[in-house]
Image: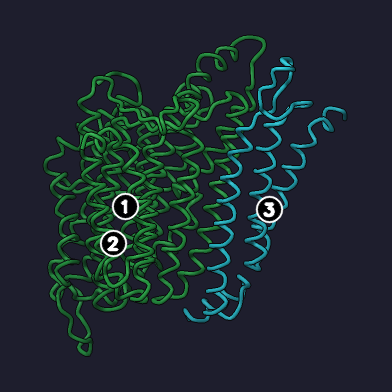
């Protein structure tokens, strides 16, 4: 037990990796699901323990060095309040969605190959958890590719329902790889300047040795750092699907199997956002990125456009899964806007929205997955009058929709409250207005669906359908319930988010 | 001119990357697209490898007979071993998906696939 405790940060990544390999070998005949379920639950327990460790430790960080090679020579894993929170989001959503996936995925892919699905599922988790926990810039790239490669394959598995999953996957693969390579090239530039790959070490060298020379007559490596940072920012924006680099997202989420959409929508882009925050705040630092380069202005324009365009395009969709995908682009805009504001409230809004949106959108995609499981489609006309046939599922969907709008007593309201107050603090009234307009459009597109669900009439000749199987319904209701719970009692989530924001800005606990 | 020629390694890398990037954007044949992606990746590999090399530098093994020796930096080279593996994996996943596309659509040309989807929607 002592051994597990000491190696917790490494185990959280190594366990799903090893279990993924084992699952692909022995996971036949339904064993795969049990292995995946066991692993995700274990990872959830570990990430809860890590969060407790971090919040209790005096320095608010837990450092782990791989193979006892001291940083910056070896790979160091660093857990601080921010990534402990993200780890918790990823492992929690993964556990709930794995529970849901059993029935859902069995109806979507060849049952003889289910164990490969669960193996990929665990590899995807390995990558996402690894990106979150690592303190090494190059290691981050490798784990980014591990998660991406398994994601491309998971998306392509939607081919039996609709062959467009394949074109969505290849499109995602091309754009995702370009993004990852941009990031890789960016690290090369920073490595040339600092000779280090450890994120904290690069930051230390930049702030103590490189930046001070820029105010003198002989600025060192000015262009190199600019280009390196720009390449990394563009690469990560592609991963995060920040407008206008969101092209891969709508089709990938629409045509992926239901459980994959739920997992990706609530974790993959969140981890991308986390990586972006990490590069901005702990790699190059706020002074460089915001005060010197004015990245905040660029990010705010992107975020504003994402909120407006994402929500508007969502409104125009008739395939509800695509509607949710476009709505995700808008929600990524809110997250980006939060950290672009660069104050404590803004960052708190970002972190808390990572969490709240993961619950909300995860629950909605799962509810929609039940519709697909029962009716085979997710078009608007298939949802007509389903409020009576699938009362619990549709209640979960509606709760999520209210969260997207940001109605009080839902989790979405808490994030928007922080976000709007951060906008006012910075005097960015136009951004506050965009947030409100975005919520208004969210009201329109949610209403469109809710109206069809509760006031639409199901065609007379439609086959009779039953409420969802219990193993799919419980996880869906769990996430929808959590999104309401964290809207009513936001004290825990906002305490963790504020701790993360204050840690990033270095203003003490 | 001399300054341009001195940095020929960077030119090689930029040209490779741009050929790849052009292919990714302009080609409609998916296999060509995947290969262009690979070329783009190779550009990045060349960049890493060239920044680790110093003129006249030897292998990074401490030589007691020659304390003045200059060593090349092995770290970028070691990193690229990982990146090459990642590149191969990406290419193989891409090819696997393309094979699947060929089976379901009967073509690997993006424009034909789009036309088919438009027809299906109407």
How far apart marks 1 and 3 lie (CA) works out to 33 Å
Closer to viewer: mark 1 or mark 3? 3
Q: Which dot marks residue B39?
A: 3
The reply to the same-chain question for discs 1 and 2 is yes
Q: Which dot marks residue A419?
A: none
Packing grade of label 2 (10 A; few <14, some 14-19, many >=20) is many
Circle nearer the N terminus (1, 2): 1
Judge left or right: residue B39 versus residue A377.
right
Q: Are marks 1 and 2 in contact (CB under 8 Å)?
A: yes
Q: Are marks 2 and 3 in contact (CB under 8 Å)?
A: no
Q: Tell me where residue B22 sits by quadrant.
A: bottom right
Q: Tell me where residue A333 sits by quadrant.
A: top left
> What shade does chain B have?
cyan
Disc 1 on helix, strand or loop?
helix
Q: Which dot marks residue A365?
A: 2
- Colouring of the image: by chain
Chain ID of residue with mark 1? A
Chain ID of residue with mark 2? A
Closer to viewer: mark 2 or mark 3? 3
Judge left or right: residue A229 versus residue A46.
right
How far apart marks 1 and 2 lie (CA) works out to 9 Å
Question: For the C terminus of chain A, which image quadrant?
Answer: top left
> What shade does chain A have?
green
**Residue positioned 26% across, 74% down in the render:** A373
Judge left or right: residue A217 versus residue A318.
right
How far apart marks 2 and 3 lie (CA) works out to 37 Å
Disc 2 on helix, strand or loop?
helix
Disc 3 on helix, strand or loop?
helix
């Amino acid at each position: 037990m002592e051994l597990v405790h000491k190696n917790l940060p490494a185990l959280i990544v190594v366990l799903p990796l090893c279990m993924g390999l084992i699952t692909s070998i022995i996971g036949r005949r339904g064993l795969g699901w049990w292995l995946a379920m066991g692993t995700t639950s274990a990872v959830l327990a570990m990430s809860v323990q890590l969060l407790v460790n971090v919040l209790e430790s005096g320095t608010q960080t837990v450092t782990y060095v791989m193979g006892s090679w001291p940083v910056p020579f070896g790979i160091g894993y660093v857990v601080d309040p921010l990534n402990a929170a993200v780890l918790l989001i990823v492992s929690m959503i993964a556990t709930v969605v794995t529970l849901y996936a059993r029935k859902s995925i069995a109806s979507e892919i060849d049952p003889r190959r289910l164990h490969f699905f669960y193996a990929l599922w665990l590899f995807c988790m390995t990558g996402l958890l690894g990106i979150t926990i690592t303190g090494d810039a190059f290691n981050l790239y490798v784990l980014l590719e591990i998660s991406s490669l398994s994601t491309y394959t998971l998306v392509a598995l939607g081919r039996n329902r609709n062959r467009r999953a394949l074109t969505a996957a290849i499109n995602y693969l091309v754009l995702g790889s370009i993004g990852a390579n941009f990031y890789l090239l960016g690290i090369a530039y920073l490595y040339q300047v600092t000779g280090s790959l450890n994120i904290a070490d690069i930051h230390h060298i930049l702030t103590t040795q490189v930046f001070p020379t820029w105010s003198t007559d002989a600025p060192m490596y000015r262009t190199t750092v600019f280009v390196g940072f720009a390449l990394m920012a563009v690469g990560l924006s592609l991963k995060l699907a920040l407008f206008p680099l969101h092209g891969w997202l709508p089709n990938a989420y629409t045509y992926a199997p239901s459980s994959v959409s739920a997992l990706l929508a609530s974790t993959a882009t969140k981890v991308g956002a986390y990586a972006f925050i990490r590069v901005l705040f702990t790699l190059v630092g706020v002074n460089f990125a915001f005060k010197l380069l004015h990245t905040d202005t660029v990010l705010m324009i992107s975020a504003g456009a994402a909120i407006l365009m994402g929500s508007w395009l969502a409104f125009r969709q008739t395939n509800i899964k695509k509607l949710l995908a476009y709505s995700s682009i808008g929600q990524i805009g809110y997250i980006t806007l939060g950290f672009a504001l660069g104050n404590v409230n803004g960052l708190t809004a970002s972190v808390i929205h990572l969490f709240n949106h993961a619950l909300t959108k995860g629950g909605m995609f799962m509810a929609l997955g039940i519709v697909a499981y029962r009716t085979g489609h997710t078009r608007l006309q298939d949802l007509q009058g389903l409020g009576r046939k699938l009362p619990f599922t549709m209640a979960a969907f509606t709760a999520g929709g209210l969260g997207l709008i940001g109605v009080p007593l839902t989790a979405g309201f808490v994030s928007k409250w922080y976000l709007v107050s951060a906008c006012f603090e910075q005097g960015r009234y136009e951004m506050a207005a965009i947030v409100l307009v975005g919520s208004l459009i969210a009201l329109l597109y949610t209403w469109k669906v809710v109206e069809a669900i509760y006031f639409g009439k199901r065609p007379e000749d439609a086959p009779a359908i039953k409420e969802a199987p219990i193993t799919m319904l419980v996880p869906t209701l769990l996430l929808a319930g959590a999104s309401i719970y964290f809207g009513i009692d936001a004290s825990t989530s906002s305490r963790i988010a504020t701790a993360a924001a204050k840690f990033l800005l270095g203003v003490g606990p | 001119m001399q300054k341009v020629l001195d940095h020929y390694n960077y030119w090689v890398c930029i040209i490779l990357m741009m050929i790849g990037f052009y292919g990714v954007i302009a080609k409609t044949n998916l296999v060509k697209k995947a290969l262009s992606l690979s070329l783009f990746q190779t550009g990045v590999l060349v960049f890493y490898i060239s920044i680790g090399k110093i003129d006249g530098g030897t292998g990074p093994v401490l030589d007691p007979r020659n304390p003045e020796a200059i060593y090349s930096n092995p770290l970028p080279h070691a990193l690229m071993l990982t990146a090459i593996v990642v590149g191969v994996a990406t290419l193989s996943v891409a090819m696997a998906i393309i094979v699947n596309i060929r089976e379901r659509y009967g073509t690997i040309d993006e424009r034909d696939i789009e036309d088919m989807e438009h027809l299906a929607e109407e």
